[in-house]
Amino acid sequence: MELVTAYNVTDIRKDFPILNQTVHGKPLVYFDNAATTQKPLPVIQALTEYYQGYNANIHRGIHTLAEKATAEYEGTREAARQFINAAQREEIIFTRGTTEGINLVAASFGRAFIKAGDEIIISTMEHHSNIVPWQMLCEETGAKLSVIPITDEGDIILEEYEKLLSEKTKMVALVYVSNSLGTINPVKQVIDLAHGYGARVLVDGAQATAHLDIDVQALDCDFYVFSSHKMYGPTGVGVLYGKKALLEAMPPYQGGGEMIKDVSFERTTYNELPYKFEAGTPNIADTVAFKAALQYVNNIGKAAIGEYEQELLAYGTEALSGIPGLRIIGQAREKISVISFRVEGIHHQDIGIILDTQGIAVRTGHHCTQPLMQRFGIPGTSRASFAMYNTKEEIDRLVQGLHKVRKMFA
Ligand code: 7TS
């Protein structure tokens, strides 16, 4: 019988050296994981090993270091493919992150397939990264942007979405998990409905990929984008997944090295996938180290991480609800471990500053979702977002901290 190791948060925390420090004389409580997660030792070591052992430019070299660097870089592509269950390695394009992935699709797919009179659908809870590129495309092409409304709890209204869909719809771009509310959207339903009209669907997986099991083939999404740094990997690297036939039909995003087959002053032919979309020397070190993050998550297990984070969410929701004047923004049917809140009479910025003096890191503001804040009629929230290494004791510290904040403003 296989031995199942119990989820051991104490051991996990030992792998994240940054957590073991004091801030303003208090042990650090890091609750800003939706902005970026901390990195475990294997990721930090992979970065050092690359620069100390085999730093070289990839693909072009035949010397030993270049071959090793290329193999490691391509190894991450395979690990990322498996992580989201893409069918083929050609469907995994390395980017700088979620934002660049969306811009790539809006620019390249948009240029080729979207024209005046076409429609693009997004939702009220999109991050600016999944709004602005589509607005830019609409300005350029004369296409129209429509927005799926949400309930007061923070769920998208599927019936309203269905009303927006038509033969004119060419793209539906939806966030899988809201960074401001924690809402897990019913993306499979959204995708199937869109496909009924021949529309393509891009899923913004920035907040989903660290917390949920991702299977792009089961979802049948056309594009899926995410960032390494929100799932325990380095900054500056991300993935765009696209269905191969679509990527093949799309023009390159940037021109330059590596994305060409042959260049003459008369005519240039483009490289095959995935290189067609990877112009210039990529972020080799961070891409290589991203593999260590994927392996780290796999070793602990997505299911175990998800279950533990749900425990933190339930515990945190109950604990915070007990604070007088505190209102949680985002009470969707299904959520990941994000709690956005407001405290009556106290500005979110003040909450963040005072919590910081107690060593507690939360994010405050509009979280790059200004239209969503407008929907709720608020300027911003304070947001605690939990990751695999957080604990109930840390949530208790947050609760104590918030009581202190309230006292200061009483
Ligand atoms: N989409 C979502 C849903 C996000 O949460 C973010 C970043 C992005 C896109 C952009 O990702 P990037 O890696 O390209 O920057 N969200 C946040 C946040 O909630 N706080 O800081 C960044």
Image (tube, helix red, strand yellow):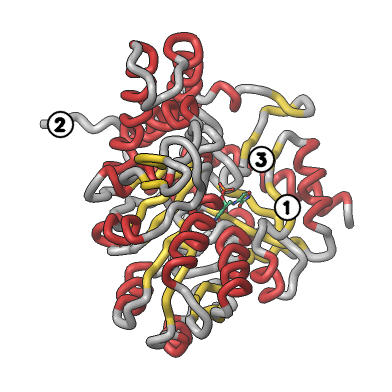
The percent position of residue 186, horizontal first and vertical second, equals 39, 69
Q: What mark, if any, has residue 2 been given in the picture?
A: 2
Give left or right: position of 41 versus 363: left
Query: Quick one: quadrant of the C terminus?
Result: bottom right
The secondary element bearing badge 3 is classed as helix
Disc 1 from disc 2: Cα separation: 44 Å
Q: Amino acid at mark 3?
A: Arg
Disc 3 residue: CB within 8 Å of ligand 1: no
The percent position of residue 226, horizontal first and vertical second, equals 46, 49
1 or 2: mark nearer the eye: 1
Residue position marked by numbered label 1 in the rendering = 364
Q: Amino acid at mark 2?
A: Glu
- Can residue 114 be seen here? The reply is yes
> Is the residue under label 3 in contact with that under label 2 (CB below 8 Å)?
no
Q: Residue at x 59, y 56 (%)?
A: 339
Give left or right: position of 293 versus 329: left
3 or 1: mark nearer the eye: 1
Q: Residue at x 43, y 21 (%)?
A: 42
Q: What mark, if any, has residue 393 been given in the picture?
A: none
Seen from the viewer's position, the closer of residues 372 and 88 is: 88
Residue position marked by numbered label 3 in the rendering = 397
Q: Amino acid at mark 1?
A: Thr
Q: Local crowd at mark 2 within 10 Å, few (<14), some, or many (≥20)?
A: few
> Is the residue under label 2 in contact with that under label 1 (CB below 8 Å)?
no
Among the two numbered marks 2 and 3 on one chain, the one whose residue lies closer to the N terminus: 2
Query: Quick one: quadrant of the N terminus?
Result: top left
Disc 3 from disc 1: Cα separation: 18 Å
The total number of labels drawn is 3
Among the two numbered marks 1 and 2 on one chain, the one whose residue lies closer to the N terminus: 2
Q: Local crowd at mark 1 within 10 Å, few (<14), some, or many (≥20)?
A: many
The percent position of residue 405, horizontal first and vertical second, equals 81, 49
